[in-house]
Image: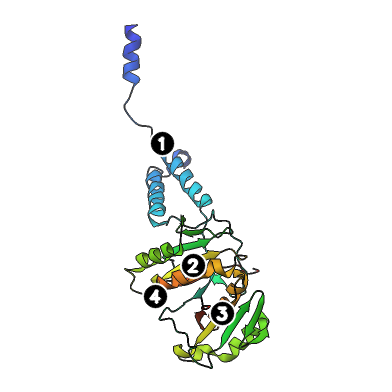
Amino acid sequence: MKKRLQRQKRRSVPVPIASMGDIAFLLIIFFMVCSEVSKDNSKVQVTLPFSEFVEKIEIPVAARVAVDENGDIYFDGYQVDSVKEVELGVRALLTKTVSDDQRHVQFKCDAALPKETFEPVIKAIAEGGGIIEAVGENNE
Amino acid sequence: MRQRSQREKKHRSGEIPTGSFSDIAFLLIIYFLVATTLVKVKTITADLPTGEKTSQPQSDKTPIVNLRGVEVFFNDHKVTMDQLNERLAALELGAQDPSKRVIMLESASGTPYENYFQALASISKHDGVVAIVEEDE
């Protein structure tokens, strides 16, 4: 009996850690493959307008258009010179779309900008075939 | 001297130390998890149908929202944003044919985007289809 107890003491439980590195690297590869690089115009200085009706967007957007406080227009993060470029860009991106869910275009604009600046951009997106997802904030 | 070099050669092995690989990998995972921001912006959806420009209004009964600076008019009556919401809700656009859901949106020059956005949000929320009215050049 005493002998058996001694034998039990010697017994060690090895944790299999040899494959931990493989698992971890597989996880990294999985995240890298699944993640989408954000094309958000985060550098664009914009004061968003308020509305109680804004909701979190669940649909992926085909393109991102932003108009900053100076009236400069950005298409997918790159500054463009005219609204025509926005229309052509949206049209080009939407040529291969098959459903309405693929036509959503995010539109971010400074709240203080006058109609003369933002309305041509809205029209350009609409002319290009995009459904506008106008970004705003609510009090939540 | 000869003995030392023999000893050194014997101890040298060509194995790459992989013991810390799992630590490195998990540190990378933690870094990505901490550094990642899940961007989910809040938006309103507005489908602006495009078509031929017409100088005639679609119908005499087509509701029209006018934005004149910070003032809002609904069918030529001055309203607040809350009143506009009530009027649009009363129209029950969701239950009507798509052709009868059209709400015309006219804005005077200088109208800030804040007001335009609120009107657009209100129309879209009540299932309206926005038709932008252009000024004559």
- Does the residue at mark 4 contact the one at mark 2 (Cβ under 8 Å)? no
The residue to which callout 3 is attached is B106
Q: Chain of mark 3?
A: B
Q: CA distance from mark 4 to mark 2?
A: 20 Å
- Does the residue at mark 4 contact the one at mark 1 (Cβ under 8 Å)? no
Q: Amino acid at mark 4?
A: Asp
Q: CA distance from mark 3 to mark 1?
A: 69 Å
Q: Is residue A116 among the parts visible in the rendering? A: yes
Q: Are marks 3 and 2 on the same chain?
A: no
SS of the residue under disc 4: helix
Count of labels in the image: 4
The residue to which callout 1 is attached is B19
SS of the residue under disc 2: helix
Residue B7: which disc? none
Would residue A89 be found to the left or right of residue B38 on screen? left
In this view, the residue in front, B119 or B28, is: B119
Q: Of the residues tagged 4 and 2, which is closer to the observer?
A: 2
Residue drawn at (45%, 84%), measured in percent from left and top? Answer: B54
Q: In the rendered image, which quarter contains the N terminus of chain B?
A: top left
Q: Are marks 3 and 4 on the same chain?
A: no
SS of the residue under disc 3: strand
Q: CA distance from mark 4 to mark 1?
A: 51 Å
Q: Chain of mark 2?
A: A
Q: Amino acid at mark 2?
A: Val
Q: CA distance from mark 3 to mark 4?
A: 26 Å
Residue A97 coordinates in the image, percent (x, y): 34, 70
- Does the residue at mark 3 contact the one at mark 2 (Cβ under 8 Å)? no
In this view, the residue farthest toward the front is B137
The residue to which callout 2 is attached is A121
- Does the residue at mark 3 contact the one at mark 1 (Cβ under 8 Å)? no
The residue to which callout 4 is attached is A100
Q: Amino acid at mark 3?
A: Glu
